[in-house]
Amino acid sequence: MMKARRSTPKRHLPTSPFSPPAEPPPLETFVEGDRVSHDKYGLGQVIAVGPTGELVVDFGEQKARIGPPFSKLEKL
């Protein structure tokens, strides 16, 4: 029988000789009207922000819905 994976990360012990894990960088926040650059779609403008943080971005010829963590999206 297989054990279920642990959903929480292991905690760092103060007596450990290893340094604690680095904190993940905070998610960038976007608002309507922000100019953005995407690795695949190019330059665009945020036209809507959804309740769960997803963005609708107008890239001129097309509109795309992009969800967090926005790894390929950069605010200009």
Image (cartoon, rainbow, N blue to C red):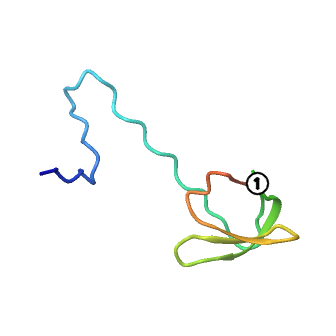
Task: Choose top left, top right, bottom left or bottom right for residue 50.
Answer: bottom right
Q: Residues within 10 Å of mark 1 (few under 14, many from 20)?
A: few
At a point 23% along the width and 51% down the height, the residue shown is 6
Question: 16 or 50: which is nearer to us?
Answer: 50
Asked whether, in this view, residue 14 is left or right of residue 37, the answer is left
Q: Residue at x 33, y 32 (%)?
A: 20
Residue 76: x %, y % from top left: 78, 54
How many numbered marks appear? 1
Q: Which residue occupies 81% across, 64% down? A: 44
Depicted 45 relative to depicted 18: above or below = below
In the visual, does 48 lie left or right of 10? right
Residue ID at (30%, 24%):
18
Looking at the image, residue 54 sits to the left or right of residue 15; the answer is right
Residue 60 x/y as whole percent: 87, 70
State whether residue 45 is above or below residue 24: below
Q: Tell me which amino acid carries mark 1.
A: Lys
Farthest residue to the top: give it. 17
Give the side of residue 3 with respect to residue 44, left or right.
left
Which residue corresponds to mark 1? 40
Q: Position of residue 51 (x, y in %)?
A: 54, 78
**Camera-nearest residue between 38 and 20:** 38
Q: Seen from this angle, which residue lies furthest front?
A: 1
Image location (x, y in percent) of residue 24: 46, 45
Looking at the image, which residue sits at the far right? 60
Query: At numbered mark 1, what does the secondary structure look like: helix, strand or loop?
Result: loop
